Amino acid sequence: MPNTVAAGSDGVYGPIGPFLRPRGPSLGKNAAMTLRAGPLEHDAKLPDGRSVRVRVGLPEDSYIRAKDLTTVTVELYGDGEHLAAVSTILDPDQVDEATHLLHRIVTGLESGELSPTAGAIEPLADTLL
């Protein structure tokens, strides 16, 4: 992944907050937090021992400028492959909700309640709980 910082000892990546690691340009004084600064990412350890990276953020699209994107997606990567991608109902400015969604998906994957498929994560991506 381009421009990804190394994981901390807790395996967490991302642009903001104590749960997430700084990445990219720093935000100026009184700047709003947004997923435009970078995606939220976390590695989940599946019950069968595999590792899956969960990414919540703007899709990477070389044809559309990031400032013009409004879609937030959840993507799963594992075993060197792209496993799943679904659109969410989130806006780029809904960082708290995106963080909560990331935690719900990681917890579900690690507990075995969710499988690493688009069909399994889509119901979570369609809610703001």
Image (tube, rainbow, N blue to C red):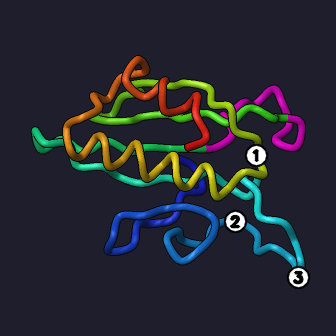
Question: What SS does tag 1 mark?
Answer: loop
Residue nearer the viewer, 24 or 41 = 41
Q: Give the overall secondary structure of the magenta segment.
A: loop
Q: Is residue 67 magenta?
A: yes
Q: Which residues are magenta?
A: 57-68
Q: Residue furthest front?
A: 129
Q: Position of residue 91 (x, y in %)?
A: 76, 41
Q: Residue at x 55, y 24 (%)?
A: 86
Q: Residue at x 76, y 74 (%)?
A: 26
Whole-angstrom CA distance, mark 3 to mark 2, is 16 Å
- Tell me, for residue 29, which label it has, or none: 3
Nearer to the camera, 3 or 31: 31
| Location of residue 47 with respect to 115 vertically, above or below | below
Residue that carries the numbered disc 1 in the rendered image: 92
The amino acid type found where label 1 is placed reads Pro
Check disc 3 and give the amino acid type.
Lys
